[in-house]
Image (spheres, rainbow, N blue to C red):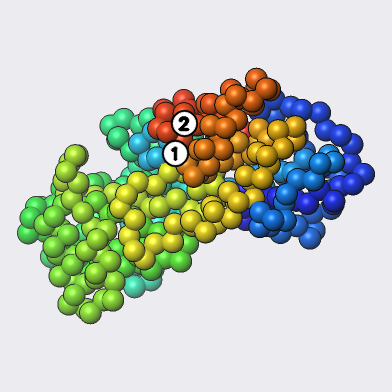
Amino acid sequence: MALALLVVAAACGACDEPSRTSWGAAPRLERLDLTAVALLPAAAVEAPPDLTAPAFVERDPAIGALSIGPTHTGELIDGVAIEAGVGLAILPFAQEREAIFGTPAMVGLITRAAARVARMTPGSTLWIGHLSRARGGPFAPHASHQNGRDADLAFYLMAKDGTPADEPAMRAVDASGRVGAKRFDVVRNWALIEAMLEDPAAQVQWVFVASSLRTLLLERARAVGSPLASRAERILFEPRDSSPHADHFHVRIYCGPDDRLAGCLDAEPFHAWVDRHDELVTRWLDGLVPFLDNPHHPEVDHAIEAIVRMNATAALPRLDALADHPDPAIAALARDGAAFLRGARSRQSWERWRPRDVGR
């Protein structure tokens, strides 16, 4: 479901003239019959001169959590808590710091992958470390983990006899795959990576892990002839700006479609097989831009906000043109929005541009 619905003004011919609201308070459409509403192309939402109905409906709460901004300066709205389940447990330190929240895509990804490994090898337990806090934001000692799209996962370990020996801890593994009397379980750890890469509802960008363990995982993938071996080569990576990740996986996923419309911002690289939802964003932008041509429409400020949240830099010339608008509120909003799209993206600015109709 998209974040808002564009509607044709004719559907509300009897609605009263709405008063202009500040950009922080969205008008509501309480009388409209929305049963036939669909996402419309730009040509279908041109505002006629006598348009009197608001053109946007507030975000549907059924969407769930939203990831806002980038992973290192963003925030999380209505974060979903991950729960222990089949083959899945939460490390005590993550519970204590209340760092167990993510987007529905991230929580679902981990839950499904852990259950799959547990079905394959009974007795398996994937121990979960930090995700994000309920509202995201800065979370020491991490530079990321700020908007629900990062998660730390302990490795699967095995005993000398090859049976599962998973521990409620993140233990460092040496270059040969040993950790004390136990070993890095290549079979189950590869099964976990494969399950995440095959997941239908989340798209993995990175799995940070030490290069020695990356080698073991890729050898396993090639040995079993996995068609995902080439993708794993791209997503398994030892970071250069942090620890080598010899004691856990750090998984990061891309923004989902609703996240992108709300202001989620991916960083490169963009793997060739990933759907970045550009077509959806373009359709929404095409539907929003016509409202900027009618400066007296009560929804022009809301159109500006939606354009900015979508990171629609293609609309910068249109915002620049509104910077000298006779309405001081619209002019100020257009200038602030243009500055944001040009890179003024502090945590405070992401907080300002987040969807205003979501409760905290």
Q: Which residue is drawn at 85% across and 52% down?
A: 11
Query: In the image as oriented, which residue stretches furthest toward the top?
Result: 328
Is there a contact, CB below 8 Å, between mark 1 and mark 2?
A: no
Residue 326 in view (yes/no) = yes
Question: Could you tell me the amino acid type at mark 1?
Answer: Gly
Is residue 249 found left or right of 9 in the rendered image? left
Q: Mark 2 points at which residue?
A: 340
Q: In the rendered image of this protein, does residue 223 appear above or below residue 108?
A: below
Q: Residue at x 23, y 58 (%)?
A: 236
Q: Mark 1 points at which residue?
A: 69
Front one among 178 and 10: 10
Question: Residue 246, percent across and down?
Answer: 16, 49
Identify the mark at residue 207; answer none if there is no mark.
none
Query: In the image as oriented, which residue stretches furthest toward the bottom?
Result: 225
Q: Earlier in the sequence, mark 1 or mark 2?
A: 1
Front one among 337 and 66: 337
Question: Residue 108, percent across and down?
Answer: 47, 57
Residue 322 sits in quarter: top right
